[in-house]
Image (cartoon, grey):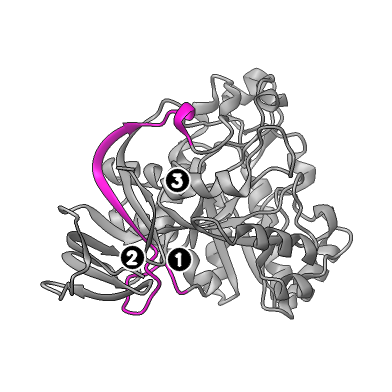
Amino acid sequence: MTSLTFLQARLVDPATGRDELSDLRVEDGLIADFGEGIAQNGDHVIDAGGAILAPAVIDLRAAIEPAFTPNGETLDSLAQAAAQGGVGTVVVSSTDATPIDTPEAVLALRSGARPMPVKLLIAGGATANLAGETLSEMGLMAESGAAFVSQGNRPIADAASFRNVLNYAAGFELWVASPARVTSLSSQAAATESEAAARYGLHVEPAMSERIAIDRDVAIAELTGGRLMIDRVSTREGLEAVSRAKKRGLEVCATVSIANLALNAVDADGLDPAFRLSPPLRSEEDRRALLSAIESGLIDAVVSDHTPMSADAKAQPFAEAAPGSISIETLLANMLRLVHEDELDLISALRPLTSGPADLLNLPQGRIDIGAPADLMLVDGDKPWVFDTESSRSLRQNAAWKGRRFQGQVLMTLIDGGIVYNQKG
């Protein structure tokens, strides 16, 4: 494998807090050395010119569509979109359409992922068809390579069933990702509680639903010794419940969707179906609480929640439109926008995209360290650009970010030292 050296890069490593101008050398797919004036040994040399060189993004939640879906998102298109967005590792999540709830399904996806430009991991369905009644074969899925198990967008309403899931998963040290939502309080919900939602007569998902669900799930996790991943927390009340659980030393982690960090309920007030999301967009107070939780380290990972779907599924009245947005190409860009707007510092913004998720899944990537995989992204942190769905690598166009201006663009993505995306071609 060809060795290469980056010269004069702004080396940013959230795992150590490093942020300095430096050179970095890659050899045999690994980070071989970094510092000032390192030996180049006839390598291919890239003059970074002060651009950010950081670990490639690790995204714990992105979806594809079922095989043979006309014009649907495939593993290949997802991987291409990920590489363009600086994402080096993607966890393909279970959804109602693609539950991935058998060892055979996990193996089939892993087999299909082998020639892809980025690393693709699988979140197996915790229960059959995510219905919450019959446990999936989690042990065999773990042996087949499942990174963790997930309930997709469906919480398990029955406490006894959720106890069984956590008990079973604990035997294989698998995280169980479950959305924080009380179904009876959130049925058919299209929006958060607000004056606008009341005015439009929308079914709402109250913040209390999230807090109650987290408290219940944490109690069951404590009872079973299971590892609970609170999937896409979105409210201040939910964060307080997460904080209580972590202070008690329980094996609890939390993720947040980039949409809930970058947008708020006002964005959905126009009833544009592009902003019909799950969890729904919350108040500005909730969004600011999430930003504080990123800075404090309470949130372990920020996810794209990339949810591709057909134009027909979105071309409905707001309350009837399917929830979701393609987001993997704009995950990093949205975090950089928060940096430019002085809502986050760069290290805090990149930590839940890199070392945070790597630590959760015990992955060797996600950090700049000698001997670590050279999964890296080179980013012009100031370059302005506009997200155009027509030029997106994703095969779908249901984007809440359509036409949005960003500042900070990926120039290059490397996986195991190989260049899988280069803006220059």
Tag 3 secondary structure? helix
Where is residue 163 shown, x and y percent of the image? Answer: 80, 69
Kindly identify the residue that appears in the image at 33 percent across and 51 percent down.
412
User: Is residue 221 covered in magenta?
Assistant: no
Q: Which mark is residue 331?
A: 3
- Of the 4 image quadrants, the one containing the C terminus is top left
Is the residue under label 1 in contact with that under label 3 (CB below 8 Å)?
A: no
Dot 2 corresponds to which residue? Answer: 14
Residue 250 appearing in the image? yes
Q: Amino acid at mark 1?
A: Gly
Spatial separation of the CA atoms under disc 3 and disc 1: 15 Å
The quarter holding residue 148 reads bottom right
Is the residue under label 1 in contact with that under label 2 (CB below 8 Å)?
A: yes
- Of the 4 image quadrants, the one containing the N terminus is bottom left
Kindly identify the residue that appears in the image at 65 percent across and 40 percent down.
206
Q: Circle 3: is it few (<14), some (14-19), or many (20+) Cα within 10 Å?
A: many
Dot 3 or dot 2: first in sequence order is 2
Tag 1 secondary structure? helix
Q: Amino acid at mark 2?
A: Pro
The quarter holding residue 204 reads top right
Where is residue 170 shown, x and y percent of the image? Answer: 72, 77
Magenta residues span 364-392
Kindly identify the residue that appears in the image at 70 percent across and 53 percent down.
94
Left or right: where 8 falls relative to 112: left
Q: Amino acid at mark 3?
A: Leu
Residue 232 appearing in the image? no
User: Is residue 370 covered in magenta?
Assistant: yes
